[in-house]
């Protein structure tokens, strides 16, 4: 068993500021009493709460009260971060707000920064956080581990650990994430035209299959320093959504998709830092896919230029 302190970054938006003059811990057990003592020294927050502007420059910066709140728990080595927050909510502080749904890495709704690293709550065992370089040090020589939990960087904070992922969703929506098939029907081995479905060879599927695993959690965006600092950039998640269709052999609007991301605020701000790939909970090689998209755009331009020159000659 481990004694841990969860140092949670709290945020209360301006409208409800008057209701939260002090963090509202409810004591049901000894750990809650300890938490109350810790809470007496609420500390100023230094964690990132939001980007000042999104890539479309429209998202407002939320205004409100920020503070950190320490919760003490005794947990087993199998406990994950979502278990910890649920226990706090049930036994210590029902006012703590965070988002989750499936509990096993499929819905993508519980991305936060744990010790400064974007991760999903439900897939993060507490023991994996103990060696984090940025983990806060305990105030004395006890074996208590402090784990800092903050909202996902790069997005406006709605309340506590809940951020507004709409900037990411709107970027993905703008890239029309659905197949625009070419209309060219495949011929079956027996010579008949297949009018019912667009067939694909396994190797064609392989070209984009990994990208279909994206759950739009936003971890890659929170991990990308280019995106977090507010540089106009479609962001890694939208790049994955674009690649999903660019590399699909059935797609008929590839040129349109290239045009949508081929500018200085599109895919090109990526500097290949690869933190997106390192953090993706679905194991997607985001950085590698972005590089392949860039290569495909360049090859397409060269092809267009060649055709243009030949036609002009
Ligand atoms: S690419 Fe990975 S990290 Fe990024 S949104 Fe999709 S699943 Fe999440
Ligand atoms: S709760 Fe669904 S991914 Fe973590």
Image: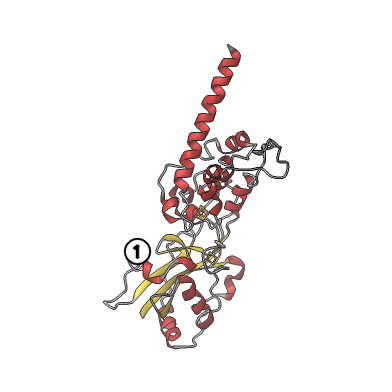
Q: Against 224, is 4 above or below? A: below
- Give the side of residue 4 with respect to residue 192, left or right: left
What is the quadrant of residue 192 in the picture? top right
Residue at the spot x=39%, y=70% of the render?
Answer: 147
Q: In this view, which residue lies farthest toward the front?
A: 190
Q: Which element carries disc 1, helix, strand or loop?
A: loop
Q: What percent of the width, then of the height, locates residue 161?
A: 52, 66
* Residue placed under numbered mark 1 in the picture: 132
Q: What percent of the width, then of the height, locates residue 143?
A: 30, 77
Q: What percent of the width, then of the height, locates residue 205?
A: 55, 45
- Give the side of residue 114 with respect to residue 158, left or right: left
Q: Is residue 192 visible?
A: yes
Q: What percent of the width, then of the height, locates residue 85?
A: 49, 74
> How many numbered discs sit on the rendered protein?
1
- Give the side of residue 229 with respect to residue 99, left or right: left
Residue at the spot x=60%, y=70% of the render?
Answer: 16
Q: Local crowd at mark 1 within 10 Å, few (<14), some, or many (≥20)?
A: some
Residue at the spot x=60%, y=52% of the render?
Answer: 169
Q: Against 258, is 101 above or below? A: below
Q: Against 210, is 77 above or below? A: below
Q: Quadrant of the C terminus?
A: top right
Q: Is residue 44 visible?
A: no
Q: Quadrant of the N terminus?
A: bottom left
- Give the side of residue 74 with respect to residue 239, left or right: left
């Amino acid at each position: 068993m481990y004694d841990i302190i969860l140092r949670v970054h709290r945020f209360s938006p301006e409208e409800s500021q008057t209701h939260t003059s002090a963090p509202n811990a409810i004591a049901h057990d000894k750990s809650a009493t300890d938490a109350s003592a810790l809470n007496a020294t609420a500390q100023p927050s230094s964690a990132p709460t939001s980007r000042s502007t999104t890539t479309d420059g429209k998202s407002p910066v939320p205004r409100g009260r920020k503070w950190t709140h320490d919760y003490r728990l005794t947990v087993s080595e199998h406990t994950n971060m979502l278990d910890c927050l649920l226990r706090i909510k049930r036994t210590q502080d029902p006012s703590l707000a965070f988002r989750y749904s499936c509990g096993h890495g499929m819905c993508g709704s519980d991305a936060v920064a744990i010790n400064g690293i974007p991760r999903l709550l439900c897939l993060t065992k507490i023991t994996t956080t103990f060696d984090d370089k940025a983990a806060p040090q305990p105030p004395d020589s006890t074996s208590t581990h402090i784990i800092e939990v903050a909202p996902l960087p790069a997005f406006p904070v709605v309340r506590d650990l809940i951020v507004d992922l709409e900037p990411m969703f709107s970027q993905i929506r703008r890239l029309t994430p659905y197949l625009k098939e070419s209309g060219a029907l495949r011929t079956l081995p027996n010579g008949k035209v297949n009018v019912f479905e667009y067939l694909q060879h396994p190797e064609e599927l392989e070209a984009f299959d990994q990208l279909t695993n994206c759950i739009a959690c936003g971890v890659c965006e929170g991990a990308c320093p280019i995106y977090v600092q507010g540089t106009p950039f479609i962001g890694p998640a939208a790049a994955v959504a674009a690649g999903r269709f660019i590399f699909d052999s059935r797609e008929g609007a590839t040129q349109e998709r290239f045009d949508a991301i081929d500018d200085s605020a599109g895919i090109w701000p990526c500097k290949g830092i690869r933190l997106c790939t390192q953090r993706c909970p679905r194991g997607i090689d985001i950085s590698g896919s972005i590089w392949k998209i860039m290569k495909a755009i360049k090859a397409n331009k060269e092809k267009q230029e060649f055709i243009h020159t030949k036609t002009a000659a």
